[in-house]
Amino acid sequence: MRFWHGLGYTPTEELAPLARHAEALGFYGVTLGDHWVTAEVQQDRYDIAADGVTPWQDQVPWPDPWIQFAALAGETSRLRFMTTVYILPLRDVFTAAKAISTAAVVTGGRIHLGVGVGWQKLEFGLSGQPFERRGRHIDEQLEVLDKLWTGEHVEHEGAFYSFPRIRMQPPPPSPIPIYVGGTSDAAFRRAARHDGWEGAVYPWNEIEAYVAKAVQTRQAVGRSLDDFRIIVGCTEPTPERLAQLTEWGVTDYLKPPWTDGLNATETSLAYKLDEMSAFAEAYGVGGD
């Protein structure tokens, strides 16, 4: 099992020492989420939470993940970087393609792209991108990314983008794995067409059904599970539960960013480093 450590909700000045520590402990990679803004008064329901309320306050930093990952790559040598998740349909595809491919070049191919359709209508209103059509939008965006990232001359004719033969440089140095987040039927189908399903950190009693759905949907499109990643975390992990996740087919464990009743913006760096070390020892991170 590969271990990812979430670095969200964390003061930006702490990210470099945390990334260095994650690499030293043997974590496969670290993750960051993606939001443009946080409303002073929450405008939209956050369906991942049972009460619909976001688990962060408006002082939580949300650095641009590609710029931040490029900076963290300079502090590390092998650590991978993944978005959990990047709201691709907030952007036009060319801005996203250029930023992600540049980050892949700068990091030496250590970028993993987790994408989702988003939930916050407020941000879509700010972006000018259509909220109600975001599912169809992201599907076409993923098609266009595959074309642009070849580094060759490509063309496209679609509902959202149409362009003559063009070439985007620099291309990624290697294919960027694409994982799709979300628990709707459409999200699972989208994930099945790409490199994996990226879940969130869920209560234990919800996970088995989500994993089974990811597996079944992948098989339904006639694709192998051998190169399909299933990424998920649980709110109350134990060694026995991680063993069960592996039996179900989970390939990557997503450790949350110090959210056990604590706010990562308020806990000390020393606490975070110690807690990361304790987790790594308890669960055999880096032991493979």
Image (tube, rainbow, N blue to C red):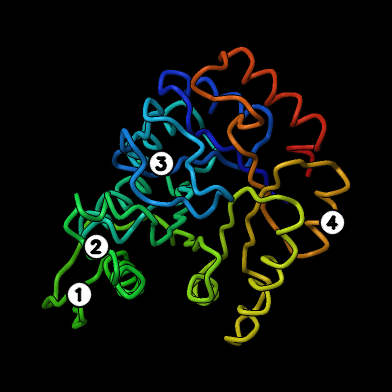
The residue that label 2 is drawn on is 93
Query: Which residue is disc 1 drawn over?
Result: 160
* Amino acid of disc 4: Gln
Q: The residue tagged with tag 3: helix, strand or loop?
A: loop
What amino acid is found at the position of numbered circle 1 in the picture?
Answer: Phe
User: Horizontal and vertical percent for residue 228?
Assistant: 62, 68
How far apart, in angstroms, are the residues tagged by discs 1 and 4?
Answer: 42 Å
The residue shown at (39%, 57%) is 118
Dot 4: few (<14), some (14–19), or many (≥20) neighbours within 10 Å? few
Residue 241: x, y in percent?
83, 49
Q: Quadrant of residue 131?
A: bottom left
**Mark number displayed over residue 244:** 4
Q: Amino acid at mark 3?
A: Thr
Locate residue 267 relative to residue 277 in the image: left or right.
Answer: left
Is label 2 in contact with label 1 (beta carbons under 8 Å)? yes
Dot 4 or dot 2: first in sequence order is 2
Residue holding disc 3: 107
The crowd level at tag 3 (other Cα within 10 Å; few <14, some 14-19, many 20+) is many
- The 10 Å Cα crowd at callout 1, few under 14, some 14 to 19, many 20 or more, is few
